[in-house]
Amino acid sequence: MVRTLYVGNLPWATKPEDLEDLFKQHGEVVGSRIITDRETGRSRGFGFVEVTDEDADKMIERLNGADFQGRVLTVNEAKPRANE
């Protein structure tokens, strides 16, 4: 199974590959994406990483509060979008 992790407080210049490289140090990564502003195309400072179920808790434990390029990351399990 795959779980999606929310990653917040990212540096503005972070690319999806940077997220993958960081998380691959702690387990298997399926994919990653950085959320961008629709109008400007700039990063909104957060993203999502899809990881294997068995590695997800370990990644949250090790990377939540970790320093990444001078920023303290927020990492937790992504919550499903609320139906509007």
Image: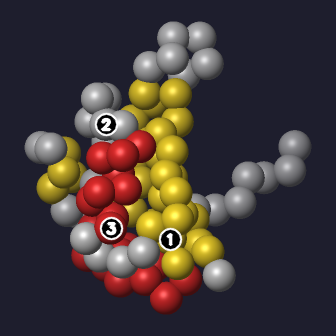
Above or below, 31 against 64 in this view is above
Name which residue lies at 45% across and 67% down.
29
Question: Residue flagged by tag 3: what amino acid is it?
Answer: Lys
Residue 5: x and y, percent? 50, 63
Residue extending furthest toward the right: 84
- Per the model, the C-alpha gap separating discs 2 and 3 is 16 Å
Q: Is residue 42 left or right of residue 18?
A: right
Residue under circle 1? 51
**First-in-chain label (1 vs 3):** 3
Residue 49: x and y, percent? 48, 58
Q: Nearer the viewer, residue 39 or 28?
A: 28
Residue under circle 3? 24
Q: Are marks 1 and 3 in contact (CB under 8 Å)?
A: no
Q: Are marks 2 and 1 in contact (CB under 8 Å)?
A: no
Above or below, 84 against 27 in this view is above
Q: Is residue 74 left or right of residue 6?
A: left
